[in-house]
Structure formats: structure tokens, C-alpha cells
Image: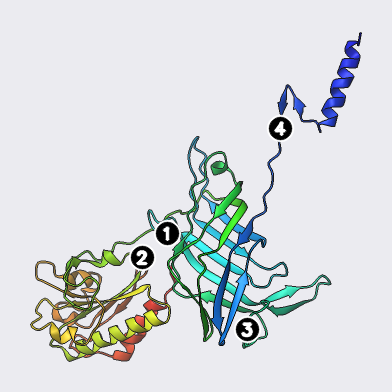
Amino acid sequence: MVGKGWIRVLWLALVAALGGCASAGVTTVAPVDTPLTASGAFSTSIDNGDFSVSYQGLKATATMTHQINKDPGGLACVPALTVSAAQPDGTCKLELEYQAGFQGEGLQLKSVKFWARAKVTKADGTSSFALCPGWSSKEPSSSEVVYTSVGATGSMPLEALGQPEAGMAKAILRNRTLQPQFGGIVNMKYLGRHFNVDLSQLTFKGDITSTGDENAQCVKTFHDLPAWKLQDINPGSPFYNTTYGLDAFKGKKIVVALVSDWCASCRSQAQLMQKLQDQANNTGHSDTVMVLIADKQSSNPADLTKVIKTIPLFQDVPQVDAWAKMNEGHASKFKGSEIRNSGYGFAKNGAPIMYFQPSGNGNLDMGAFEKAVNTVIQAADD
């Protein structure tokens, strides 16, 4: 018969052999780490050559922020995420940055960056700049070359964090899949150089570490735009003959000008607005919308529609008086017909960022107006 002392010795030996995992009949299994890796590739053309960059199986990194929610069962939203992948030596780095959108939009693409030439640090501590393998050798700079997206749109579908991760200051999300969604081909630009690329094949999968922040803002605040609805009377506009207002352009940068069909400077202003819209579309700034509002005293709108192609032209009416609503914050300067040729610019969040003061007598400084409009086109997304 084996004594009780020997039974205890055998039990302790068994526990030791199992790595100390046996306790009251419960076995604890440590989480398995899954490094974040990328998959997919992109091909493009630049300098009359075709190039392909693969990220298949490469190590990826993710920097994520969640809004801490300590309520039992409460979820935590994610207002910021940056994910990137590169060759082991740091070349060919591709980075996607996301930020909170407006209500119901979730994470929206802020920028895409590609390091055509990156700084590489060697084992001995020395560093140099190296091209992405296979990339064009015609890059003009011998130092860092980073292409940045222009006007790119997209989102990152990502579920809110559940408990206990939602309440943690630092949470590890196990084996998650990040599948970026893009609004179309992405235009990448560095100085005067550019290339177009389809990034829709990119995927990231593995563990993600998220930093909690109690003050993180998960939804962008949208400022109220001037509220009016009028009929779009430009046959070339996508919304011709329908009645709507500025809210239809929510999330875009907006430039509005007040014009009269009989006013020579107004017709020139309308023509310039169309030119600037075309330029914006062709330079990756299609997130900007030009809008004209015709005087409620208008007698022949065709004088305006024949000098524009695609931009909306709204016909003001006395019952709406959109001119007065647009000028509400500036009525102490000019009013009535004096506000003809005035211009108003709004950021993507609806905040007013430009006011072009009219002369009050129908004269228009076209150069000054173009400069004012370009401040809106070039404005940051935030």
C-alpha cells in the first residue's frame, strides 16, 4: 500500500511536469500570439514602366485607439487606426491612416503613404536611403521619397470592442482581420510625380494592440450648413431639376457663390467656378464641390447655364431667400443686392472656413476670388 505522503509527492511531481498548470482540477491555457501579417500586392505604372509590389506574408504593424468603456457589457468604439507593412529592411512601406467619420460612417480613410525610397539602418548602425526593390530608379531625390494619396476615400470595417477589452487601458485583440475598403483607384503624388494604384487586394490579419483613451472622440462633429432647399436648374448637373440643399454635399468641401444672370462679373465668376471644379477633379480634389445660387430676381438663367457645364446652379426664390441665409453671418457688411459675387467656403465637417467679401457694386477681383476658392480646395480634411 502506498502511503499518503507518497501520494502527495507523486501529485506534486505531476504538477511540476505539467508546468504548474494543475490547480483544483482546472487547466489554464495561455493565449497564442498571432503576429499581424499582410497579404496582397499592387501593380502600377510610372516613368513608362510597370512595377509590382507584394506584401504577401510580410510583417505588419497597427496602432489603434479605443474609447474606454468600463460599463458592464458596454462596447468601446475605435476612433483611430494606422496600419502598415514593409519589407524586413523597411523598404516599400505602405501605410493606411484612418480616423473617425461622421455619425454612422465608422473609420474613414485619411491618407495612404508609400515609401518609394526609405531610410534603411544596417546591423552596424549605419544608415542609407534605398529604393523599394524593382521600383523606378528615376526618383529625383536621393533621400526619402514618400508618395501621399490625394483625395482618396475609403473605410475600415471594424467592430466595436467588447468586454473586457473595452474597459482596458491596453487591450490585445486576437487574430483580427482588417480588410480595407476603397472608394476607387487611389492617386498617389510626390512633388510633381504621381501614379494610380488599386489597393483593393490588401488584407491584414493577426493580433492588434489597442490603447484606451477615455477622452477619445469616436464621431466627428458636423456643423450645421445654411439650411435651404432650391431647384437645381443646370441641365449638366447630376441632380438637374431636383430640389435639394447643401446637406446633399455633407462630408465634402463646399464653395458657394451668389450670382445674377444679367451681371457680367457673375457670368465670369460662374465660368471660373466651373474651371476650378474641373481642375480640382483632375488633381485629386474631387472632394470639393462648387455651387452657384442664382438671384431670385433672375430673368434669363440660360445666360449662366451656357457658361457652366456640371456644377449645380440653384434658382433662388423669395419664399426661400437662400442669398440671405448664406449671408446671415455677414449681413452687417453687405446686404440685399450688394452681396452679389460673394463667396462662402465650408470644410468637410460643415465649419465655415472662407468668406469672400463682395465689392458691393458688381465689380469682382477674379484673382482674389480664385485665391479664396483655392484655400478651400487645399484645406485639410479636419
> Between disc 2 and disc 3, whose residue precedes?
3
> Between disc 3 and disc 4, whose residue precedes?
4
Q: Can you say which quadrant of the picture contains the C terminus?
A: bottom left
Residue 28 is tagged as 4
Estimate the spatial distance between the alpha carbons at disc 3 and disc 4, rounded to whole Å: 53 Å
Please tell me whether mark 2 or mark 3 is closer to you in this view. Answer: 3
Q: Secondary structure at mark 1?
A: loop
Estimate the spatial distance between the alpha carbons at disc 2 and disc 4, rounded to whole Å: 49 Å
Disc 2 marks which residue?
251
> Between disc 3 and disc 1, whose residue precedes?
1
Q: Who is closer to the viewer here, 35 or 356?
A: 35
Amino acid residing under circle 4: Thr
Residue visible at 9% across and 84% down in the picture: 300
Q: Secondary structure at mark 4?
A: loop
Disc 3 marks which residue?
136
Q: Secondary structure at mark 3?
A: loop
Residue visible at 48% across and 66% down in the picture: 110
Please tell me whether mark 3 or mark 1 is closer to you in this view. Answer: 3
Amino acid residing under circle 3: Ser
Q: Are marks 4 and 1 in contact (CB under 8 Å)?
A: no
Q: In the rendered view, would you say 17 is above or below 269?
A: above
Estimate the spatial distance between the alpha carbons at disc 3 and disc 1, rounded to whole Å: 36 Å
Q: Are marks 2 and 1 in contact (CB under 8 Å)?
A: yes
Amino acid residing under circle 2: Gly
Disc 1 marks which residue?
101
Estimate the spatial distance between the alpha carbons at disc 2 and disc 3, rounded to whole Å: 36 Å
